[in-house]
Image (spheres, rainbow, N blue to C red):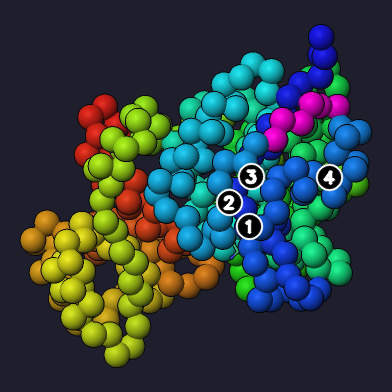
Amino acid sequence: MNSLPVLAILATGGTIAGVADAQAHAGYQAAALRIEDLLAAVPALQQLPARLQASQVLQKDSKDLDAEDWLGIAHAVRQALADPQTAGVVLTHGTDTLEETAWFLHRVLPPSDKPVLLVSSMRPATALSPDGPQNLLDACQAALSGLPGGGTAGPRLRGVLAVAAGALHTARSVQKMQPFHIPAFGSGEAGPLGWVENGMVRLAGATAGEVAAGDWPGGAYGALLMRPIPEALGVLPAVAWLSSHAHFDPRQVRALQAAGFDGVLVAATGNGTLHHALEAALMAAQRAGFSVALTSRCPQGRIVPAPSAAASPWPIVPLPAAKARLELLMQLWCARLQGCAPQ
Ligand code: ASP
């Protein structure tokens, strides 16, 4: 019997599996190659202290992912983590909505002492100098880092993380910052959780304890995975995302209500301010049972509430807009499922 631990590699498509006619970095076809092709391009993976078990969960450009895909990915990751032989999970993914899938997984996966590494690339596999192969190797090495009894060098990681261009980011802070160049991801003010350097994980000081100590406690919306996918999808709310801006037209809010949306995440200006016409439309919508939550449209920081409790009639979600919208969606979704008690 082979005593090496299993490293589950789950593939979902993205540019890392992309191909182009020429060696271009734009105008290529994402999600074209299968996971076997991606693994074959990195011979060093065969030297890792693990048995690689690859499966193709999806084959999509991540800009096109839907709630059904998130649930399918989460079920596959949960199943892989539950196998006692599995040391960690590597999930190949497109960069465009990687932060949303990372946040979804962070909020729905059960407690675990194993890491889930999302890995992507900015250049298709056919580029003159693709970044996918190195990112894939880094992700696999990070997933096996510090494994008792013979992992790769460095501390043991836990929770949902992303690795790109040598840097590690948490699900909470990872954000795509760049549409074309490398590095494309950042962790904003938090800075990266750490790095993968020549196969070795190095954590960046103070943030290390969050993932490196103790088991990862699991997400608050785990009940979304306790129901069969069609049942969960059957109560999926509709949540939009608007931004406040100069010259705001409030008909946008009324159109969402008329179309049957359940709520909206609003990326407010600055420290949570709204165009007066948007504010009035949101007030009226909220009185009619429409859910509203706010984040700031500023790329860094979070809304700091005023000392007076009456300052904001809407909950503030301290996440970038894409993840804040997803958080509001999961909150409303969970409320429709019996036994789903978010913390
Ligand atoms: N549109 C692609 C996707 O997100 C871009 C990428 O993978 O970087 O799948």
Is 108 left, or right, of 46 in this rendering? left
Q: What element carries label 3?
A: strand
Amino acid type, mark 1: Ala
Res 278 quadrant in image: bottom left
Label 4 sits on residue: 40
Label 2 sits on residue: 59
Disc 1 under 8 Å from ligand 1? The reply is yes
| Closer-to-camera residue (299/82) | 82
Who's the residue at 51% across and 63% down the image?
Answer: 63
Q: What element carries label 4?
A: helix
Residues at marks 2 and 3, CA–CA distance in whole angstroms:
7 Å
Reading the chain from its start, which is encountered first: label 1 or label 3? 3
Reading the chain from its start, which is encountered first: label 2 or label 4? 4
Label 3 sits on residue: 11
- Label count reads 4
Can I make out residue 34 in this image? Answer: yes
